[in-house]
Image (cartoon, grey):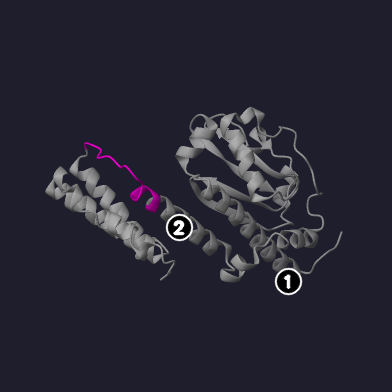
Amino acid sequence: MVTYDQDEAEQLRGELEDAIGHYMVAVAAKLLDEGLPVAGISAFGAYDDPGQAEFDGDVEGSVEFTQAFQQSLSGQDGGAGLLWCGVSGWCLFRTPQGSGQVLMDSARWMGAGLLPTPARVAAFLSTARLDPSTAGSDERPFYRAPRSGPTALLDRLHGLDDGEAAAEERFFERRFASVRTDAYQRRVLDALTAPKQGIVDVALHTGEVESLVRFLEYVEGAAPSRQARELARRLGSDLSLRARDGRESHHEHRAAFDYAVSDGAGDGAKA
């Protein structure tokens, strides 16, 4: 086994974390394209962490979902998500609250190699959503030995890079934030401009309307793209004005719709 001095090992850990992070972004982007509620990603590049020996693992990454989606996967309160293990590839884990299970107890392993394409990971999750018991296998595969050949693994991960995306944003966390914002912005635009929309009567307390407006105000301040911020601002304004002026004002207060059908929401400009 090749050994590294302290500086070399630290650099290798960082490079592995970055490469794993970009792989997680690629998978998350595919899942977002399919309409799934991806909430976050993680990457762990400490190939020599002794704490991972307990699980026969080393480096890893994950794609995380909203709590409601996790519950739909687990069937009850608890955790669920996709984990990529640097030794065994992808698995779906479901850990019902109070079950006493650890992640590996519930894992369904994809078994399609160490670094399958994002499309194959998405197909695996689609199968799992229909029937988790038929997705993959509970037999864990091993494609490499833990802590072995970290530089070879790094080379394989670099081979997956989308050169154009990597050139645009080298930090995987920022790249994920941008990808997720763009995906949700498209969903909002599609909803606002959908044909044959009806008028829905929804009884809301004034405090609930105010809460929605405040959430949109938060998005306006936090979203990384100018278009998302503007959509949030206009939706908040529409809600406030309709709450003030009543049901018949829904035709008048449509600033978000007007923006969605204008060039401003689709010009791709970023602040």
Magenta part of the protein: which range?
Answer: 189-203
Residue 198's quadrant in the figure?
top left
Q: What separation in Å lies between label 1 and label 2 (alpha carbons)?
A: 36 Å
Q: Nearer the viewer, residue 183 or 193?
A: 193
Percent from the top left, x then y, of residue 148? 82, 55
Residue 23 left/right relative to 142: left
The answer to which image quadrant residue 197 occupies is top left
Q: Does the rendering let one see residue 221?
A: no
The residue drawn where x is 48% and y is 32% is: 77
Callout 2: SS: helix
Where is residue 240? Give x, y as percent: 20, 52
SS type, badge 1: helix
Residue where numbered disc 2 is placed: 181
Q: What residue sits 13% from the left and 49% below the top?
A: 244
Above or below, 132 against 168 in this view is above
Q: Nearer the viewer, residue 180 or 264?
A: 264
Q: Quadrant of the C terminus?
A: bottom left
Q: Estimate the x, y position of residue 143 in percent, counting from the top left.
A: 80, 46
Say which quarter of the image contains residue 224: bottom left
Left or right: 164 in relation to 89: left
In the picture of the structure, the residue carrying the numbered disc 1 is 7
